[in-house]
Image (cartoon, helix red, strand yellow):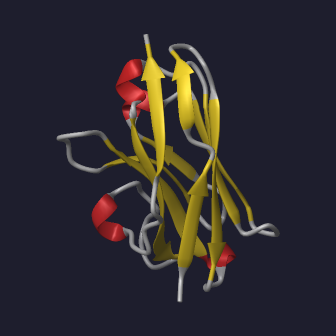
Amino acid sequence: QARLVESGGGSVEASGSLRLSCAASGFTFNEFCMGWFRQAPGKEREGVAAVGAEGSTRYTESVKGRFTISRDNDKRTLYLEMNNLKPEDTAVYYCARGPLYGARSCLPEPSAFGGWGQGTQVTVSY
């Protein structure tokens, strides 16, 4: 059974940095698209970034140039490096498993992902 466990969240001031990690188990990690998502209070869950099994990456417009998604297949771990954080980045961040490589494009669209982790809180203050 697929299991994802996020870590690395915390509270930082604006312009600060955080690195999120997502440890995966229970499935063949290197065969799947993986993604990061976030949900702020009162808002719908939105896609942040996705990385394909072959390494291609996609980002939502608001984080381009500030966030970097990466994966270490040997460690079965997904990462999200977040720099120049803004208060509007405050949310619970989740990782999830996307489509199997080749099944469809690896885009950070929540409806195409499953196996959600428990989330990790990121709070950015002014």
Residue 117 left/right relative to 23: left
Q: Residue furthest left?
A: 42
The image quadrant of residue 75 is bottom right
Query: For the image shown, how many numbered marks are present on the structure?
Result: 0
Residue 15 lies, with reference to residue 109, above or below; the image says: above
Q: Residue at x 38, y 69 (%)?
A: 113
Residue 77 image point, x, y percent: 70, 62
Q: Residue at x 39, y 20 (%)?
A: 87
Residue nearest the observer in this picture, 54 or 98? 98
Residue 122 image point, x, y percent: 48, 36
Residue 93 image point, x, y percent: 45, 47
Whether residue 9 can be seen here:
yes
Residue nearest the observer in this picture, 95 or 108? 95
Q: Residue at x 61, y 85 (%)?
A: 27
Q: Residue furthest right?
A: 74
Residue 44 lies, with reference to residue 55, above or below; the image says: above
Residue 45 left/right relative to 116: left
Residue 116 image point, x, y percent: 42, 68
Image quadrant in which the C terminus is located: top left
Whether residue 101 can be seen here:
no
Q: Residue at x 46, y 42 (%)?
A: 121
Residue 100 lies, with reference to residue 74, above or below; the image says: below
Q: Residue furthest front?
A: 11
